[in-house]
């Protein structure tokens, strides 16, 4: 506080001197320009000196040093934040891997009657005409054409081509796909085919004329046709479309597998 008072007194003294000089030189108009130059040359150093003295007394001389410190701290915080973000990404990756391993374990336990190879989807082509997926296992892993592919919810499709480390799978919702199936309520044989309109529905055709088709019925593979083993869940009948000719009636089957979200699969190599 003493230092502040001292600075104030010095400022008052200098201000008085300046005012006296203003009075003296302002008496003559001819001396106005000369006065302005002298005053400017006199006042500027004094103002600079006062500003420095005031900052020194009040501690403001540390302002720029504080800025440097803040910049340094900010850079350190940014570096630390980047390291934390990297750690978070690594943790998320580990979590995803653990989830995948859990899915593999659940699938293996659920389909323990089959010899299987686990894999995951690396590419999808789920369009109107071609509904296929590519998985990350191939001939080097023992995968062959026509092997059945399943997911936790049920049937996915079958392998149609392989490379050393990948396999292409035709899904059951592909329009070229045809699956021999049975309905759970009456054990009647039907054929499920993919449709153009939907990635999660099948058209159940060739329904026997005397078969009682029930909405909500479970549909499973029949084991006929030489590709799919018997008893793999396909989906559930959601609607029955009757026609004038009973031989033409068909049902809509909602697939158990969500083909837009499918990630993890098993390839059945053989029955135990």
Image (tube, grey):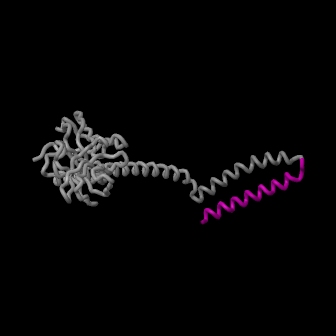
Front residue of this view, candidates 211 and 232: 211
* Residue 16 lies within the magenta run: yes
> Which quadrant of the view contains residue 133?
top left
Q: How many marks?
A: 0
**Residue occupying the far left of the picture:** 272
x 87%, y 47%: residue: 31
Q: Main secondary structure of the magenta part?
A: helix
x 83%, y 45%: residue: 34
Front residue of this view, candidates 25 and 231: 231
**Residue occupying the far bottom of the picture:** 1
Please give left or right for residue 69 compared with residue 252 in the image. Answer: right
> Which quadrant of the view contains residue 126?
top left
Q: Residue 55 appears at what percent x and percent y? A: 61, 56
Residue 91 seen in this snapshot? no
Q: Residue 153 appears at what percent x and percent y? A: 24, 54
Please give left or right for residue 263 compared with residue 73 in the image. Answer: left
Residue 72 seen in this snapshot? yes
Front residue of this view, candidates 33 and 99: 99
Q: Residue 127 appears at what percent x and percent y? A: 37, 42
Q: Residue 107 appears at what percent x and percent y? A: 20, 52
Please give left or right for residue 77 compared with residue 153 in the image. Answer: right
Q: Is 174 situated above or below 235? A: above
Q: Look at the image and tell me in which quarter the N terminus lies.
A: bottom right
- The magenta-colored residue range is 1-29
* Residue 250 lies within the magenta run: no
Please give left or right for residue 86 compared with residue 161 in the image. Answer: right
**Residue occupying the far top of the picture:** 164
x 26%, y 60%: residue: 214
x 27%, y 49%: residue: 205
């Amino acid at each position: 506080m003493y230092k502040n008072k001292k600075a104030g007194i010095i400022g008052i003294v200098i201000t008085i001197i300046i005012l006296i000089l203003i009075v003296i030189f302002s008496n003559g108009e001819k001396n106005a320009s000369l006065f302005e130059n002298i005053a400017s040359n006199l006042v500027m150093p004094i103002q600079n000196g006062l500003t420095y003295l005031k900052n020194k007394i009040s501690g403001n001389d540390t302002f720029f040093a504080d800025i440097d410190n803040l910049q340094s701290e900010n850079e350190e915080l940014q570096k630390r934040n980047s390291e934390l973000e990297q750690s978070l990404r690594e943790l998320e990756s580990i979590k995803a891997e653990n989830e995948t391993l859990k899915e593999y374990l659940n699938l293996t336990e659920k389909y323990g009657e089959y010899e299987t190879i686990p894999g995951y989807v690396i590419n999808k082509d789920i369009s109107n005409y071609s509904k296929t997926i590519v998985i990350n296992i191939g001939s080097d892993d023992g995968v062959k054409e026509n092997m059945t592919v399943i997911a936790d919810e049920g049937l996915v499709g079958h392998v149609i081509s392989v490379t050393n480390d990948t396999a292409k799978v035709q899904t059951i919702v592909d329009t070229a796909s045809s699956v021999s199936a049975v309905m759970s309520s009456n054990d009647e044989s039907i054929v499920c085919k993919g449709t153009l309109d939907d990635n999660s529905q099948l058209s159940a055709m060739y329904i026997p004329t005397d078969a009682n088709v029930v909405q909500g019925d479970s549909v499973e593979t029949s084991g006929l046709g030489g590709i799919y083993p018997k008893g793999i869940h396909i989906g559930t009948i959601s609607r029955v479309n009757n026609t004038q000719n009973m031989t033409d009636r068909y049902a809509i089957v909602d697939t158990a597998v969500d083909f837009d979200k499918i990630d993890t699969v098993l390839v059945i190599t053989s029955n135990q």
